[in-house]
Image (tube, rainbow, N blue to C red):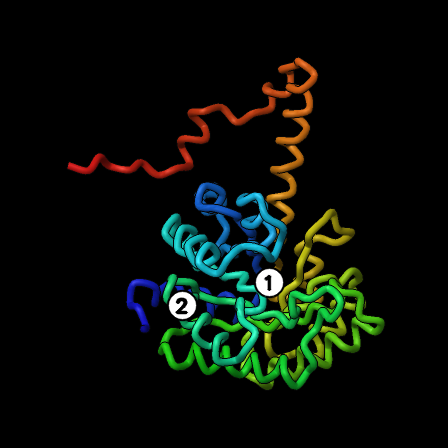
Amino acid sequence: MSDSRFAARRAAFRALHADGCFLIPNPWDAGAACILAQLGFKALATTSSGFAWSRGLHDGDAALGEVLQNCRDIVAATPLPVNADFENGHATSSTELKANVKRCVDTGVAGLSIEDYTGRPHDPLYPLDIAVQRMKAARAAIDETGADVLLIGRAECFLHGHPDALAESIRRLKAYAEAGADCLYAPGLATLAQIDAVVQAVAPKPANMLVGSAAPFTLAELAAHGVRRVSVGGALAGVAWNAMLGAASQLAEGRFDAMATKLPHPEVQKFMHHREATP
């Protein structure tokens, strides 16, 4: 299943994780990917929330086939490496997870994340032994494809109210690293002290930091604290929805002045691809 068309992207993506710090923004569709790719970013990542909202769904409710097609669309939109927000693998069993991971690899992504959220609000986290088993299944699936795709292990403790979120996140991320995750990720870290603790715990493997809202630190500061990559999740989608909501609210009042802030049609066109007519 290894595809030579994506080998260079995957090698470049792995190299980005070797040293330094890079920002990996999250487009929700191919159009957003086209714009981001022309702003100098070195890689992109999908966003489960941004994509689900674009489909009129709650985060987590997009079907596997829709998610895989979104990955294909974003991979096809730019020459950049793409990391898939693959949630919990869209699977309950390890066998099903392995099959789904292989399908995700087949879309051309350069990396994919597997989280330990069950999808059940009343029982949000897989027990650690089960979560590790699932991470090992994802690792095995990638290895069996022969593709150089990075596996990102996510601990969802902060997002789902674990009473000792930092300690439990570190315990889980260290276990995921041992299970074969190439990069570790605990969304919800809020302070530099928390970030330091995670970075040091998973070293020498790289850590991803989510900045999903206005933050009191800069990318340079995060780099100085050892963060290897920074993503924004559904934040860009949220910014876009907020702008649309503001403009539409004015329209509902019979006003059109918000249209002065729109990106002109020719400017949008510059970012997009031209599809040649089929003979």
Q: Which residue is mark 1?
A: 229
Mark 1: amino acid: Arg
Tell me the quarter of the image containing the N terminus: bottom left
Residue that appears at 48% across and 61% down: 64
Instruction: Compare residues 212 and 96 and report the one nearer the observer.
Output: 96
Q: Residue furthest right?
A: 163
Query: Which badge, 1 or 2, comes first in the chain's sequence?
Result: 2
Label placed on residue 103 = 2
Residue that appears at 71% across and 77% down: 200
Residue that appears at 42% across and 65% down: 12
Residue that appears at 56% across and 50% down: 52
Is any atom of residue 11 visible in this view?
Answer: no
User: What is the x, y in percent for residue 101?
Assistant: 46, 71
User: What is the x, y in percent for residue 176?
Assistant: 61, 80
Work out how far the residue at label 1 is from the one at label 2, CA to CA, in angstroms: 25 Å
Mark 2: amino acid: Arg
Seen in the image, is 147 located left or right of residue 91?
Answer: left
Q: Is residue 93 above or below residue 19?
A: below
Q: Residue furthest left?
A: 279
Q: Quadrant of residue 110?
A: bottom left
Q: Residues within 10 Å of mark 2 (few under 14, many from 20)?
A: some
Instruction: Compare residues 207 and 225 and report the one nearer the observer.
Output: 207
Tell me the quarter of the image containing the C terminus: top left
